[in-house]
Amino acid sequence: MIYQIYPRSFADADGDGIGDLPGLRSRLPYLADLGVNAIWLSPFYRSPMIDGGYDVADYRAVDPVFGTLADFDDLLADAHRLRLKVIVDIVPNHSSDQHPWFQEALAGRNRDRYLFSRTPNDWRSLFGGPAWTQVADGESYLHLFDPAQPDFNWRHPEVRAEFDDILRFWLDRGVDGFRVDVAHGMVKDLGAVAAFDHEDVHEIYRGWRKILDSYPGERMAVAEVFDTAPERVARYVRGDELHQAFNFDFLEAPWDAATLRDVIDRSCAAYDVPTWVLSNHDRPRHVTRFGSERRARAAILLMLALPGAAYLYQGEELGLPEVDGPAEARHDPRTPSRDGCRVPIPWSGAAPPFGFGPSPASWLPMPPDWATKTVAAQRANSRSFFHLYREALRQRRTWPPDGVAEVAPVAGRRAGVRAAVGAHLGDEPEPFAGPARSGRPDPHQRPDVRVGPAPGHHGLVRRYAVSLAAIRAKPARTSSTLGGGVGVCTSPSWSSNPLRSSS
Ligand code: NOJ
């Protein structure tokens, strides 16, 4: 189980309103207590922060806003003491336009480390507009994202050697692995229709795998390969390439039993180690996407009961919804903005910034009504999201490594929606009645998670989805705190997310 941390928004130690590594370090015991096995840190490298740090100016330095390399080493040591593995983000498709190599390229030297052309093709940037920007002498450079993120030329041997060295730099410090940003983007054929998923990218990963395997202990890499069919994504996790790839089909699936069933079946068929993710720093939070807290509770039990690797995004264990912040506070260069899922974590207290840092500042405004969503408030409430996640994670740790979970709806109509699912491993699907004391199910009762021996994969996964179908067919009559209804998606930005539709 890997927990994603967006460092700007996790915990602020120095009071500048921006999360940092010392703040994160001080909260590691919380993560250990929650039951996390590993943390993945979104970029904390030196960066002008045009794209929240996914525009790297120095791949071997910590940006001063987050702290120092010594802070990183301390964080890593503490994490390892707490038995938490640490995965860092690597951003190889593009650098920042402030990277020394790009500055050299602008000055007319060593331009071929990037992709310059006098005859740009018609590719579009995933952030909108053309994927090419012209420089003073008339040539244009390629950027699949913001103009401040020029794409590297991965056919250049210096680019390859540089990234081999960057991997070693962090592995030498002791990191346990990497999350590879836009892993299907690096090698391009400018004459092709599509910018992504070029065959030659796999050779890079075969090289990276050798590097990872040359280090002692278990090191891993997980690929971000979006807008690609699972059968193609599976090629990034062949035995001599990367270890895992994010399951964007699951992340993007609406609250619809047939779709979920299909995604689960296809994923289990495509991957040796399927992965599951419901929220991250790029997508609207799933409480909002699915339209209710009850569905979010059901969804996480469904996800944590599936075989494979689960990824959680900070704050989902608090049931945080997407935040519709004021336009003047906007940071994200992309439209629609992703700021709504990047709002700082509420830790304690009755008013913003809810213990995020020692000063009243927070880089994105926090909703004033989050007092009941803080970690402190949820710890004190046994019915909270926090306790649901912690208990589900505890149960998950006790399952056999090759175990398969099955989910059955709780008995009773409203409880079937409220508590939604209980997961168990067993030969027979066993409707979970829940620990209600009276004849009627307690609508506030947390679902139970049961464990038993594991039979084969697919039949059970299918029954899982059938259970969801039953739930969907009988929505609760009461409306949820977030609007309720059977609608699949309440976030207007979701359907027009350009990261879903391009290429
Ligand atoms: C994917 C990252 O998750 C996203 O946040 C970023 O904007 C793009 N890659 C570009 O690096």
Image (tube, rainbow, N blue to C red):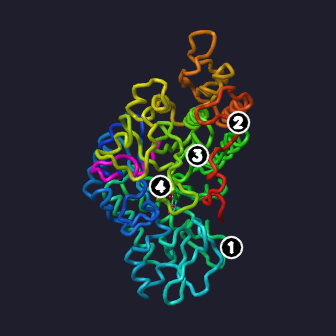
Along the viewing direction, whichever of 33 and 222 lies nearer the viewer: 33
Q: Which of the numbered marks, if any, corresponds to residue 9? A: none
Can you identify the residue that label 1 sits on? 193
Graded by Cα atoms within 10 Å as few (under 14), some (14 to 19) or many (20 or more), the crowding at tag 3 reads many
Q: Residue at x 68, y 73 (%)?
A: 193
Q: Which of the numbered marks, if any, corresponds to residue 486? A: 2
Along the viewing direction, whichever of 405 and 48 lies nearer the viewer: 48
Cα distance, mark 2 to mark 3?
28 Å
Q: Residue furthest bottom?
A: 137
Q: Residue at x 46, y 79 (%)?
A: 113
Q: Secondary structure at mark 2?
A: loop
Q: Amino acid at mark 1?
A: Val
Cα distance, mark 1 to mark 3?
29 Å
Cα distance, mark 2 to mark 1?
38 Å
Q: Secondary structure at mark 4?
A: strand
Cα distance, mark 3 to mark 4?
14 Å
Residue 396 placement (x, y as % from top left): 50, 32
Which comes before the other along the chain, label 1 or label 4? 1
**Residue 247 appears in the rendering:** yes
Can you identify the residue that label 4 sits on? 221
Q: Secondary structure at mark 1?
A: loop
Q: Mark 2–mark 3 contact, CB under 8 Å?
A: no
Q: Amino acid at mark 4?
A: Ala
Q: Amino acid at mark 3?
A: Pro
Graded by Cα atoms within 10 Å as few (under 14), some (14 to 19) or many (20 or more), the crowding at tag 1 reads few
Q: Mark 1–mark 4 contact, CB under 8 Å?
A: no
Which comes before the other along the chain, label 2 or label 3? 3
